[in-house]
Amino acid sequence: MKVAMAEEFLKTRPTYAPDTDKMPLSPHLQIWKWTVTMASSILHRATGIALYAGSVLFTLWLLSAAVSQSFYNQVTGLLGSPLGLVVLAGFSWAMMYHLVNGIKYIIWDSGRLLEKETAKKVVWVVILLSFVLTGLLWAVALGMKG
Amino acid sequence: MANKSTKHFNHQRFTALIQIPLVIWFIISVVRLIGASWTEFTAWAGEPLTALLLVIFILSIFYHMRLGMDEVIEDYIHKPAARSRLLMLNKVFAVILGFTALFSVIVITLNGTH
């Protein structure tokens, strides 16, 4: 039965089936001309992966406070060091980029602002906003600290 | 009703929307807490409203993070065995870390009462 079906398929399959040997390969990443929209998409993944790693620090921070005062002091000593603060600033920007760019995807998914030139402008707005909002949140927080 | 991919998509967007206000609150809180002593920190985390927001934040981000990493694994790992192992590892990582964070908030909250 199956053989008969296969033979039937071979007889009736379309003769315009593409000759795969002559088909162009889909360009690999290093062949693509870089565009801002592509870069912003890659950056969305990169920040997502960075934040995935950052969740270890977040958990460690909470856990240290639950475990003991001295453990908390050790962990926050590292996080509050100059290098730790740079890392913290980086993570806060990664969060804001991922957030603003995520909103961009929700807007694009609704079919809005997708026209080529508009889409490019939207990407620049996202990048700009991610830095501005990160700075703003730090300013607000430091202002509240007094 | 909805298939697996639709569910994945919906859950990812739903957690993302919840996180918009939570992330803003979280970043401001963390920056304010730079240099905070253990007493100050546990007093903050032990407040009912803070603890509640932390719990929602934790549930949402660890789930969102797992969904996102699932996509990366599915895009780049083509060997079925390696792929299913990594997907499992991703789930275990998110669950263990997420519950550790949740557990910590609960401990801090309970400690604050005495």
Image (cartoon, rainbow, N blue to C red):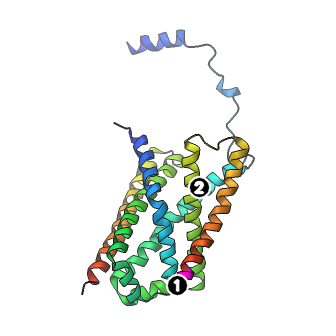
Badge 2 is on which residue?
A: A101
Q: Which chain is mark 1 on?
A: A
Is B5 displayed left or right of A114 in the figure? left
Magenta residue span: A142-146
Please tell me whether mark 1 sits on a helix, a strand or a loop. Answer: helix
Dot 1 or dot 2, earlier in sequence: 2
Residue B15: x and y in percent read 43, 55
Tag 2: residue type? Asn
Badge 1 is on which residue?
A: A145
Please tell me whether mark 2 sits on a helix, a strand or a loop. Answer: helix
Q: Nearer the viewer, residue A72 or A118?
A: A118
Residue A54: x and y in percent read 50, 69
Question: Would you say residue A67 sits in the magenta stretch?
Answer: no
Is A104 displayed left or right of B109 in the figure? right
Q: Tell me the quarter of the picture where residue A2 sits.
A: top left
Name the residue rendered at 72%, 49% in the picture: A35
Q: Residue furthest right?
A: A33
| Tag in front: 1 or 2 | 1
Residue B7: x and y in percent read 40, 44
Seen in the picture, residue A6 relative to A108 is either above or below; the reply is above
Discs 1, 2: same chain:
yes
Is there CB contact under 8 Å for labels 1 and 2?
no
Q: Quadrant of the C terminus of chain A?
A: bottom right
Tag 1: residue type? Lys
Q: Quadrant of the N terminus of chain A?
A: top left
